[in-house]
Amino acid sequence: MKSCEVNFDGLVGPTHNYGGLSYGNVASQSNSQQSSNPKEAALQGLAKMKALMDMGFVQGVLAPQERPDVGALRSLGFSGTDAQVIEQAAKQAMPLLVASCSASSMWVANAATVSPSADTADGRVHFTAANLNCKYHRSIEHPTTSRVLGAMFADQKHFAHHAALPAVAQFGDEGAANHTRFCRDYGEAGVEFFVFGRSAFDTRYPAPQKYPARQTLEASQAVARLHGLSDDGVVYAQQNPSVIDQGVFHNDVIAVGNGEALFYHEDAFLDTEQMLAELSTKLAKRGGQFKAICVPRSQVSVEDAVRSYLFNSQLLSRADGSMLLIVPQECQNNERVWQYLQTLTSSGGLIREVKVFDLKQSMQNGGGPACLRLRVALNETELAAVNPGVIMTAPLYGSLTQWVEKHYRDRMTENDLADPQLLLECRTALDELTQILKLGAVYPFQIN
């Protein structure tokens, strides 16, 4: 049965703003308090989805969240009508209002960890929503994320959904941004690769000194157990603490994998040689031939990798066996990174082509092409069981661009977040979106 990897991209939400909320994310913090353009951000993201669809890749859409999250503000002691809750928060605790308005759910690489049916004990596709408990503004996402994923992948015969792990530091889980999968073919059993920043209980593992390590070994192990993965199909690797301290807050800022290939920076991991050997051995037992593509620090520094988001790219398999790299325009703007990419694609190796996309609005908020997508490997039967309303088509692209043009503002500052009208605009837009994507009632204002 033929299988494919579907990229479900996060649709940027109506409250897209530069709150600078993510300590350890250099781009997010450096652009804090600047004016954003939600409409442009959403249209840029949709343009990337449409372009990949036009190239022949199966492309899906993952809906944004309701913001501001009035329920979260109420749980912190603000009361009254929705408008009064927003007014109180703006006067008494503006940082909390900014956090409750974050559009960070656009980074759907953090939405969940996904294991395809070829890897799991019960032969279903498994989803575990990420608790994202390292940052308050992200920790409030997983209840809605779970409902949206449940509406997209509803058939329990094919799909299994797990609640987020306990929301404590020992089980910090940031989802697929620290997980990838290697396989000979998407429909065959593969090797799942979990990258962690620290161990919660084992002091033998070093930890970063400046920025937090958001993914724990224990969280990765728990997800592997929940998904019914066998030991011979899992590899755990520790991210280099020194690169976390240089702004590499997730593994997908310093490495990206697909098929049989891992494209990574020389300084990405600890115990790199041991990790590569384990990946190679385990993938070989499953019929694959592991290929490591190392970017040397002498050609691209960690600083350049973080500034350009070279590794926060999409590595896509093409019919001829070669791979295509989808990168943000910032890679082209960085002379050293662009020179490296020209050398890479002309060398006759696995990665033969680079395509550049303008994603400035999302890049300024700390995420590139890979942050915007959640990968789900599906066979033909499973793909047919996915809610068809979320699979990108030319008509859906047209409907979504019209929806954005109708509902989104073209300018957003911190002061705008205190406008009670913004909540009404967001709810009106999302109510219409659930009809376009055929999701049903997934938002708090629709349920309560």
Image (cartoon, rainbow, N blue to C red):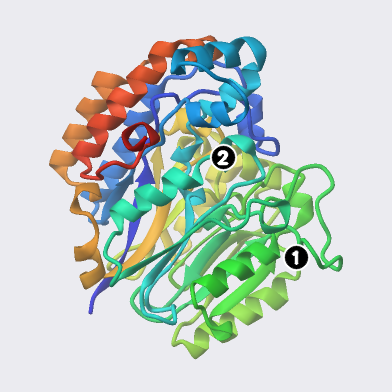
Vertical placement of residue 297 versus 217, above or below: above
Q: Determine the secondary structure under disc 2.
A: helix
User: Does residue 139 appear to the left or right of 247 in the view shown?
Assistant: left
Q: Residue at x 63, y 70 (%)?
A: 221
User: Does residue 305 appear to the left or right of 351 in the view shown?
Assistant: right
Where, quadrant-wise, is the C terminus in this rendering? top left
- How many neighbours does mark 1 have within 10 angstroms: few (below 14), some (14-19), or many (20 or more)? some
- Quadrant in the rendering for residue 279: bottom right
**Residue 74 vs residue 289, the one in the foreground:** 74
Disc 1 versus disc 2: distance between alpha carbons?
Answer: 27 Å
> Which residue is most to the bottom?
285
Give the mark, 1 or 2, whose residue is nearer the N terminus: 2
Vertical placement of residue 216 versus 276, above or below: above
**Residue 91 vs residue 232, the one in the foreground:** 91
Pinpoint residue 8: horizontal percent, then vertical percent: 35, 51
Q: Residue at x 84, y 47 (%)?
A: 209
Q: Residue at x 67, y 58 (%)?
A: 171
Pinpoint residue 270: horizontal percent, then vertical percent: 75, 65
**Residue designated by label 2:** 138
Nearer mark to the viewer, of 1 and 2: 2
Where, quadrant-wise, is the N terminus in this rendering? bottom left
For residue 324, say whether it is visible.
no
Vertical placement of residue 63 versus 118, above or below: above
Q: Amino acid at mark 2?
A: Arg
Pinpoint residue 428: horizontal percent, then vertical percent: 28, 23
Q: Amino acid at mark 1?
A: Leu
Q: Determine the secondary structure under disc 1.
A: loop
**Residue 235 vs residue 85, the one in the foreground:** 85
**Residue designated by label 1:** 270
Pinpoint residue 154: horizontal percent, then vertical percent: 28, 59
